Amino acid sequence: MGVSQIEKMGTLDRELAQIRFARLYRDQGRAILAYALRRVGDPDDAADVVAETFLVAWRRLDEVPNDARARLWLFGVARRVIANRHRAERRRTRLAQRLAESLRAELATHPTPASEAAEVLRAMDELGGDDRELLLLVCWEELSPGEVAKVLGISSLAARSRLHRARRRLRALMERDESAGSPGPELDMEEAG
Amino acid sequence: MKTREMERALAGADPVGRGRLDGLDLEAMEADLLADLESDFSALRESEAARLRPRHRKRLALALGSTALAVVLATVLVLTGGGSNHPSRAYGAELIRFAESTPLLLLEGPGWRVQNVSQSGQGAYVPRSSRGAGSMEFVTGKPIPYESVRITCVRQTMSKSGKFPVCEAERESGMLPAAVRQRKVELRWFHGSLADSLATAHKSLHPHGQRWIELPVLDTTADVDTRAEFYVNQGERGNRQMTALWSEGGYVLELRAAVPDLAAFEERLDWLTRVDSRTWLDAMPAKVVKAADHDAAVGEMLKGIPVPPGFSADQIPNEGVTTNRYQVGAAVTGTVSCLWFRQWGEARRSGDTAAAVEAERAMATAREWSILDEMAKEGAYPETVWELAREMPSGYWEWAGHRHPLLPRAEGLGCARWGIPVLPRKQRLQRERR
């Protein structure tokens, strides 16, 4: 591998790659942004995750599936980007900066969750990270167990069985809260202010 | 509760439900993404050229951004200048509440002051790990400039298909010199378990191995990671990175500092002092952009900026109770630029040369807008405004050897979200929504 090989990309390959990549961003950018926002909360961090995820995608464009599975592939990358985030260091790209600025205005306030939603969120907070991620992929990203398996890099069978366990744990937590008399949504409501 | 009901409740709790991101103009940011990629390409070429250079084989080549990739601290308050030696001021309930949402700690070392404060949201939808989390930066001496961290590709190859360059090993560099970094201390806080935080820290990247000790801090003991370097090329004698972790008052606290040696780190821990909210706010530099000062700040920033006919300062959005000058500056310069670009776009479509030239001349003064110079130390927004202004007479910007229309790129300044879309398509959408 040498400069010449990279330079060769200056022609047709490179243009095709750019077109494909721009389409990938247009088709999947919003889904990846939503994924990031659901997991990191802070708009600045979410913007970083999106920008970094697409830079990884650019560098590995030939590994990105050329169909609907591209979204799953990007979720997998975004998940690793989030896991590898180092609190103290932030790599800021143009996209991340602009996106963060827009997000701060767009999502200036969090919606107030309904009491049922507040209860389930409270229970989710107590779940382990893996269980939480599985359930979020199903309920928020609306993925099937087979698709979840692809994002997490596990077998479909393992995804189904883990999902079953995660549901059971969540239900147990919610039932425990119900029987103990939930502290009520007031705390979260106040926080959501 | 049945599984289906439970999952329905969870789906209903989605903080980014349908429509929440509809107002976000992701497409307008495509140009920024493409510019990031352009930097990536140049960097890979540079990296490869450096690799092949026989004698001056540069160890550090850029991979993510030939222009500096900035490390930006998201700040609720950006505090510039000032210090703690001013008389106590009267504080509104808002600021008192803000102060009390922090652990109320100050680093009372001789000559040290607060540079930044950041506090994340508290909403129910904010992940538990982020709720109530925040950070402060303390510095001594001159203000610490905006730090650029570059990603170095130290080993690269081509992808399996032979079409794409792939970086196999990266190194981050471009940090400020050790002597500058040692003039800063970062304090972070978050709700959580100290045991979990320590477990995570023990598992994190440690290029020089780990060495943990215990040191006193406030009324307790901190676990101190004395080899907390994040970069491979840190960690030599006189250039250490250390992190202390402890818990108190329901918070996990983390103090990070670049120090010459352990004694300097012990000293910094010793300077940490618990204070009341008034003293904490007194320590904040005077130049805080607050809601009350927003209009004054906007007025000051607008000085010397030519504005289009019919412009009113009310058009500049006020985006927060307490906000930073960078954001206010972006709103001011962005709003004015969007208005000029809208006039320019309409003039070019209708053939009104005079109006187009008026907009070009106004934007040509952007290099002299003092707020942009100030913001350039913190981020890339000014660079984009300058670039757009420069390309205005041609009507195009270049990327990868191709000319692209300038207006969609100008839209990326945030025009649509500020209610001043410059693209006809966006303007139509705006009219329909009304």
Image: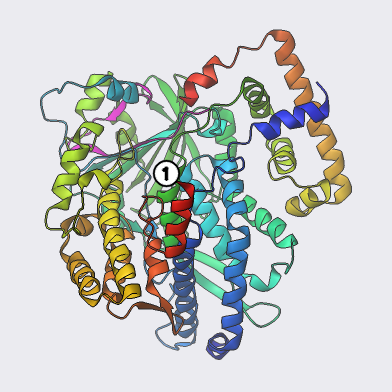
Say which amino acid is labelled 1.
Arg
Q: Is residue A116 above or below residue A30?
A: above
Location of residue B7 in the rendering, given as x and y in whole percent from the top left corner? 76, 32
- SS under mark 1: helix
Q: Image check: A173 left or right of B297?
A: right
Q: Quadrant of residue B265?
A: top left
Q: Image check: B360 left or right of A114?
A: left
Location of residue B226 in the rendering, given as x and y in whole percent from the top left corner? 44, 43
What residue does disc 1 label? Answer: A104
Residue lying at the far right in this picture: please name it: A157
Q: Is residue A101 above or below residue A189?
A: below
Q: Nearer the viewer, residue B29 or B46?
A: B29
Does the segment drawn in magenta span residue B417?
Answer: no
Q: Nearer the viewer, residue B159 or B307?
A: B307
Chain label for disc 1: A
Q: Within 10 angstroms of label 1, few (less than 14), some, or many (20 or more) residues?
A: some
Name the residue located 41 percent from the left edge and 56 percent from the top edge: A98
